[in-house]
Image (tube, coloured by chain):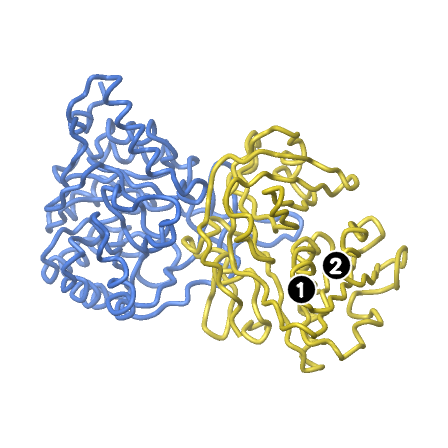
Amino acid sequence: MNLAVKIGDLELKNPVMTASGTFGYGPEFEDFIDINRLGGMVVKGTTLHHREGNAYPRMAETPSGMLNAVGLQNKGVDVFCKSIYPEIKHYDTNILVNVSGSTVEEYIETAERINELDHIPGIELNISCPNVKEGGMAFGTSCPSAVAVTHAVREVYKKTMVVKLSPNVTNIADIAKAVQDVGADGVSLINTLLAMAINAETRRSVLSTVTGGLSGPAVKPIALRMVWQVAQAVKIPIIGMGGIMNATDAIEFMLAGATAIQVGTANFIDPNVTMKIIDGMEDYMKRHNIDDINELVGGMR
Amino acid sequence: MTTPHNHAKKHTGLLKVLTNRTINKSYYVLEIEIPQGAKDILPGQFVEILVEDSKSTFLRRPISIYNVNIERNSMELLIQIVGDGTRQLAKLKKGDFVDIMYPLGKSFSIIKSGTKALLVGGGVGVAPLLYLAKNLKDNGVEPHILLGGRTYENIIETDNFEKYAKVYVSTEDGSQGEKGLVTQHSIMQDASFDMIYSCGPDPMMRAVAKVASNNNTNCEVSLENMMACGIGACLCCVTPTTSGHQCVCSDGPVFNTKVLEWN
């Protein structure tokens, strides 16, 4: 039985990856799971300079989901390369760094630094963070700006580059096609949906930033629809995500057209969930007499 | 200045409820069997409980560890009913299983033997102070505890605290103990304590920290910011500190007030 899939030059032992910002850098989960069993791990969004992120409160629980407005808190690419990378490079899985920035130049410089790291075979270009004032989603919500940043980073970044797309657009397939045409090796979708929560008693917004990004099972039907739409439009592989809580959800994303999937918010509910999803996908293949998981990609009848 | 780090392995899985003891209409204590690691749990640590069968509860609920019984391989969780999640958990019965991640976070510092400590708890914030008082007493420290609440119904488990500490009470309406806020209680005038520990509503802990600071007394508080993951991955529960945003779940929940930027 084959669970391995390919995204650009990446060979994933199975389609299950962890989503950026939901899995730290890996060590946070070592007490619970064997990181080496993952197909891939996308580490926390990394920027050129250190970022403190937004003020507390930056999280709100919502029906079947949650809002976050963390705002790309991270120590910056230098600290990542010097202190964090040496602690995680031994993992026997594909480690992707999620790269973000306020300007195209920042994306380029960060990607150049990550390009030098032997055990990082790819990046996920984050043009879809809804929680920063400059950059982030601003790049991913129009074709010209998505193309500009993807093209610029493609020039300097030599390994596998996946572009993470925003669902906060009129036509996500257009953006996917545009980044494919300037050299993206794959697209990952969806990032969180711009959303908000109000406390009626205090008449205040729950988040310090007023708006944040919605994730969890509440967004799954939208994510599934977008993966299906993008799959009709592009040839490059798709990494699907959005509210995946179990193996059945993961299979649904593959049937819609995803080659791999990312598990995000579910990691907060059950730190073992990725292992259960891998096991559950194997069970599904046995039950349906499927020898190669790639048969499922876009396999909706 | 930093609170101790617990290197004990974290666990997750279904654990058996041994007892569910009702205190009054708002509070109850769950005793949970823990097959492994009871002796590794430190005072001030917490668990994250998964609430099943609740429409409005998506994330786990962080709950302080109230007591640990190493001989019985169990821990106790003191819970106040505040929303749908804690109301669902209140229905758990002996023999039920519940999904718990434990032990999480950093603990209170245990000060050296021969010293005196004041523990100040407000409402359900008294929860982590029981196991702290027990550990302090076992370590030769003399613990005094001030339990505060709006009214007598919020003053709970005094018998339990008396096993380990000298107990003082204050209520805002004067229905039990001295009338007023905890910081107005006469014991707070006593500047002879070597350490003040506090857990409760944010304004209370800030006021307690101010008294401690005026007396040049070290002070540790346990914060309860809204959390998602409980293990330092999501960066949602941060508090501003002298070294930037830190996670309450993994860098805390216990912080020395000198590192907190409470402005």
The answer to whether mark 2 and mark 1 are in CB contact below 8 A is: yes
Output the chain of dot 1: B
Quadrant placement of the C terminus of chain A: top left
Secondary element under disc 2, as helix, strand or loop, is: loop
Instruction: Please name whichever residue, A177 or A89, is drawn nearer the observer in this view of the structure.
Output: A89
Quadrant placement of the N terminus of chain A: top left
Mark pair 2, 1: CA separation: 9 Å
Instruction: Please name whichever residue, B62 or A159, is drawn nearer the observer in this view of the structure.
Output: B62
Crowd tier of the residue under label 1, counting other residues whose Cα lies within 10 Å: few below 14, some 14–19, many 20 or above: many
Residue A86 % position (x, y): 24, 63
Output the chain of dot 2: B
According to the rendering, which colour does chain A have? blue
Q: Quadrant of residue B217?
A: bottom right
Label annotation for residue B136: 1
Name the residue carrying label 2.
B164
Residue B139 % position (x, y): 65, 66
The answer to whether one can see residue A162 in this image is: yes
In-image side of A245 versus A6 (left or right): right
Residue B77 % position (x, y): 64, 45
In the figure, the yellow chain has which letter? B
Q: Residue furthest front?
A: B71
Q: Quadrant of residue A75?
A: bottom left
Secondary element under disc 1, as helix, strand or loop, is: helix
Label 2 vs 1, first from the N-terminus: 1
Instruction: Please name whichever residue, B192 or A278, is drawn nearer the observer in this view of the structure.
Output: B192
Residue at point 29%, 41% (across, down): A262
Residue at point 18%, 39% (across, down): A13
Instruction: Please name whichever residue, B160 or A256, is drawn nearer the observer in this view of the structure.
Output: B160
